[in-house]
Amino acid sequence: MLLYVFYFNLFIFIFLIISVSFLLTSGLTNKTTRNDTIIFTNKSDIQMFHNYHTDLRNFNYSGKCGEVFQYPKNSKRDLWLTAYSFNDNKSFLRLNRSIDFVLGLANSSISHATKKILLMSPPPFKNFEHMYDKYGISIELFDAKISNSTKQGNSATRRMFAWKEWLYPRRHLYDRVFISDLRDIYIFGDIFATFSENDLLLQMQCLNNNTNCFTFNFKVDYNWMKKTIGVDVANAYRKNNTIASNVGTILGGTNKVLGYLQTFIEYTNFDKWDIWGYDQSLHNWLIYSRKLDFLKPVLESCSQRMCYEERYAFIYDKTRKMIYTNNTKCSPVMRHKIFYANEYFKLSGN
């Protein structure tokens, strides 16, 4: 009998020790290691991304640096909609270099938003659509159905059709939409909290302000415009030092984004849409021919909210693993390309 009591008490003691240890470790910390490099730490309902080179916990959004967040925080009624097409194995490898960082940031910064990738070509291997479940982003094999063209079209242009076709019947589900490229979009803060349903934001290809921007004197944009829209338009833009807008980042209310997509589709020339760069050229032509004026777009050069390539004012603090703009000391909310020391941000995988 005494032996039975002894073992029973010993069992209770061990159980209590294990229970207390579990409560202490799970209550004080909640960390999950992902791919041995990506860590999320819970702060109330916010997951703060940090890895060996970037720590969102140190980004500066306090005081004046937090004034950029003027609108409701991201929720399931906000949609980040992107797309990708695998042309070959190289395209998968190129995506894979940066995707953990890109989606890790998004999962942290817009954790409550709906995040969707439209895969416009068959996946490179089975179960690919579940590869990124851990980032809270769903992948759907979806491509536009085009009946009035004998050409397949370049995937960068065709995604506009896919986005519109996918979004339109679901428009009642979302208030704000962010359509963008996939592999080089860096969302450090809550981008949805920086704009309203009444906005349409288009990104200019600027480095830090209106005086440091890519114009159509830049050979790539000029040649794209010349081949697709026409030499007269390209020459006029070059002569006027017209600033190029980048088609890879568009934000706004759901109806505004749908209005943009519908206008893009209406003016698509199916004889040209298989040319690489046509999406960028048509996007700029729509802006400067005033076809989008009814949507009242904001042409954003380079701000805390968004910037194409913040080369000269971009500071990377290796010690604190954070970035900020030199003149304001504020951390950026979203960046398309990342530069520091006149080089690509090496650790981003871009």
Image (cartoon, rainbow, N blue to C red):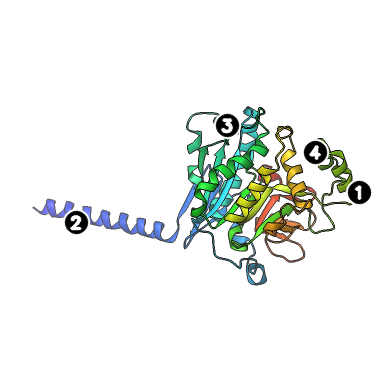
Task: Please say whether residue 100 is visible from this viewpoint.
Answer: no
Residue that label 2 marks: 9
Is residue 45 left or right of 302 when viewed as pictured? left
Q: In which quarter of the image is residue 306?
A: bottom right
Nearest to the observer: residue 88 or residue 246: 246
Counting residues from the start of the chain, the first of labels 2 and 1 encountered is: 2
Find out whether the residues at labels 1 and 3 contact each other: C-beta distance under 8 Å.
no
Check disc 1 and report its element: helix, strand or loop.
Answer: helix
What whole-number distance in Å separates the C-alpha atoms at marks 4 and 2? 80 Å
Q: What's under tag 2, amino acid-wise? A: Asn
Residue in view at x 62 percent, y 43 percent: 182
Residue that label 4 marks: 224
Residue that label 1 marks: 239
What whole-number distance in Å separates the C-alpha atoms at marks 1 and 4? 16 Å
Check disc 4 and report its element: helix, strand or loop.
Answer: helix
What whole-number distance in Å separates the C-alpha atoms at marks 2 and 1? 89 Å
Counting residues from the start of the chain, the first of labels 1 and 4 encountered is: 4
Q: What's under tag 1, amino acid-wise? A: Lys
